Amino acid sequence: MASKVYFTSMRTHGESLPHKLQRLLKKAGMESIDFDGKYVAVKIHFGELGNLAYLRPNWAKAVCDLIKAQGGKPFLTDCNTLYVGSRKNALDHLDTAYENGFSPFSTGCHVIIADGLKGTDEAIVPIDGEYVKEAKIGQAVMDADIFISLSHFKGHEGTGFGGAIKNIGMGCGSRAGKMEQHSAGKPLIDADRCVGCGMCIKACAHDAIKVTDRKAAIDYDKCVGCGRCIGACLKDAVHDAGDETNEILCRKMAEYAWAVCKDRPHFHISLVLDVSPLCDCYGSNDAPILPDIGMFASFDPVALDKACVDACLKQQPLPHTHLTEMPHVCEDHFINSHPATDWRAQLDQAEKMGLGSREYELVEVR
């Protein structure tokens, strides 16, 4: 059965865009969820410092105000990153969120970094998927009664596009969860960066790291790939191998998204605007490759992503952008933008897991 996806354009006639988003969410049935007295995780990307393509805090406030009006207790959340940047631990992550405008004063709710100070606060969720047997999800995300995703739909260098499934699956993974999705292997140590401080040894619960001649080394027979050493390293000398293919990355990500959403109410929102060619995780953003299209909402994140990508593929690329500079290899903007990717894998795997359906009915809200 086709899922309903609700859409409205960015055109307004005297109405604010945040108010129009709230109208869309009401039409899409978000208020049918029993929010009264419930903790509600609103998953959003706070943007890396220097990046200006991320969603403005005004959008988050519109969503959280609607939840609070129904008696819910919303909080904005994300998990720490696996890579070096301004969101690799909870303190830096909070500083980044506040600097980018996501404070309780601007959004009306608090920010909680779901996987804790060093990315190690996680819930183990058994899923018995094709690629993942136990998903490692940020604890605060799993502690919530209700899950809402608010996604910026854009291009992505590893998954083709980043929409609801990526915001949920990759975004809610703890450091170990992100490592599992990105890598079939275990962490690596950059000897040039390592100073032999021993912080990684203290973080390792499996006695898998030794320091010799002021350089750390990993015993891979003992290493379980938890990624705790990555969060502990003060010199960014420990990193993931990044050796998984883009297709497997997409499929693992979809299984993680299913783990986040299963067995509780969930609802999903995507804004297709400022469609940058790369993820908001970068410390800069290139010009949008497509025009702003509008706002989409659905109970089905698979249908939502499919509706968003279909809407994008109908658009003409904006001139003088990354997309128009890339070779035209097919009639797909996201594959042309990143030829080594195929976004269809994430939707295929998510549908196999029962997260949703690629068949949808688009309902326009004017």
Image (cartoon, helix red, strand yellow):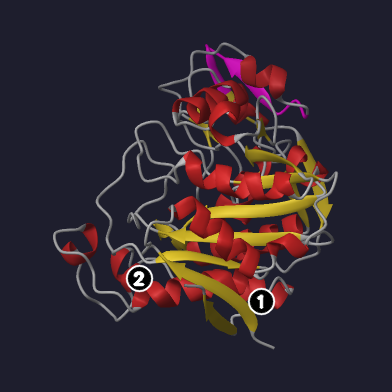
Q: Residue at point 31% right, 71% down?
A: 333
Tag on residue 324? none
Residue at which label 2 appears: 335
Left or right: residue 336 compared with residue 22: left
In the picture as drawn, the residue positioned furthest to the bottom comes out as: 1
- The location of residue 69, given as percent across then percent down, is 72, 47
Image quadrant assignment for residue 93: top right
Amino acid beneath label 2:
Ile
Q: Residue at point 78% right, 59% down?
A: 133
- The location of residue 220, given as percent across then percent down, is 66, 38
Gap between marks 2 and 1, in whole Å? 21 Å
In the image, the segment drawn in magenta is: 206-216
**Is 162 placed above or below 189 here?**
below
Q: Residue at point 79% right, 45% down?
A: 71
Q: Residue at point 51% right, 73% down?
A: 365
Residue at which label 1 appears: 351
**Circle 2: element type:** helix
**Circle 1: element type:** helix
Amino acid beneath label 1:
Glu
Left or right: residue 194 compared with residue 260: left
Work out which quarter of the rendered image holds the N terminus and state it: bottom right
- The location of residue 87, given as percent across then percent down, is 52, 31
